[in-house]
Amino acid sequence: MKSAPVLGLDIGGSSSRARLSAGGRILAELEGPGANVAALLPAVAERRLTALLAELGAARPVACCAGAAGAEVPEARVRLEQLLQRLLPGCRVEVVHDTRLVLAAAGLDTGIALIAGTGSVAYGRDRRGRESRAGGWGWLLGDDGSAAWLAREAARAVMRRADAGEPLGPLGDAFMAAARSREGAELTGRLHSFREPRRWAALAHVVFETAADDPGSRELIEHAADGLAGLVERVRKALSMRGTVVLAGGLILNHPQLEAAVRRRLGRGTVRLEEPPVAGAVRLAESALTSR
């Protein structure tokens, strides 16, 4: 069974990735739009995942592990399991929260994963197999320190300046331009039309691009770091552990200023995820085969 094809899926808020592997050899690597099963309409998530898996062609994996944003919601998890079972007949399907993929991709059985991408969440597992998760509430309720959160907080800062009749400053000018708006009322109307977190997350880059010129942007980055470090501390407290912290997610890995701020708060034992999370999904799918 070691040479049997297995499928790993990393289903995020902004993008999804599939990797078909057999005997440690990558047979196919696919990418598509995000398909958060809790944040999107079921029909939208189904359409996107159906299109992604259709690119596999005639490949028939014997096991599939899908790490999915939104899988912590029981109803959403069941919907995803049923969908994948329909799309992959005869395949052994396991759905886990996407945080599980990070430790697996890092080659670790224990430790803490901190994901800061479109959303944010921390997940930990100790030597006894106990698990704990903090955050991951979704962009409407939380996701502190994430790209969607950062864009929302930037918008609030810009609107406060506009309400006070103050200059919008570098942050405000750049945010207005990125959102293709000319004044406050137009900005709020445009942002309220965004129905997916990835559309908010796409504006987060403005904060980093204006950090050198606008103290408000620098303050937002520090607050984001506070929120992300706070997620890790909650997991540390729940598990009474101080293991390795693996940083993952496009926001933190692609913005050194945020990564440095988080590292200052977390201390030693913090590393970057060097392999894509989908590699962890493949590893978990392979483990499922050996545990049969």
Image: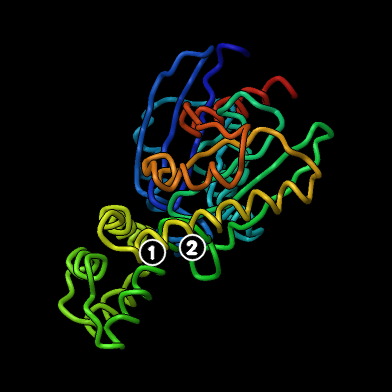
Q: Is residue 63 above or below residue 96?
A: above
129 relative position to 247: left or right: right
Residue shown at 36% from the left, 29% from the top? 57
Query: Residue 70 versus residue 81: which sits nearer the camera?
Result: 70
Question: Cβ–Cβ below 8 Å for labels 2 and 1?
Answer: yes
Residue linked to disc 1: 196
Q: Is residue 115 above or below residue 101?
A: below
247 relative position to 172: left or right: right
How many C-alpha atoms fall within 10 Å of the one at disc 1: few (<14), some, or many (≥20)? some
Q: Please report whichever mark, 2 or 1, sits nearer to the chain's N-terminal start.
A: 2
Q: Amino acid at mark 2?
A: Ala
Residue shown at 50% from the left, 34% from the top? 277
Residue shown at 50% from the left, 70% from the top? 140
Instruction: Tell me the SS state at disc 2.
Output: loop
276 relative position to 1: left or right: left
Q: Is residue 93 above or below residue 44?
A: above
| Residue 278 locus on image (x, y percent) | 49, 32
Rendered-image quadrant of the N terminus: top right
Residue linked to disc 2: 39
Residue shown at 46% from the left, 43% from the top? 259
Q: Residue furthest right?
A: 128
Instruction: Tell me the SS state at disc 1.
Output: loop
Label 2 to label 1: alpha-carbon separation: 7 Å
72 relative position to 3: left or right: right
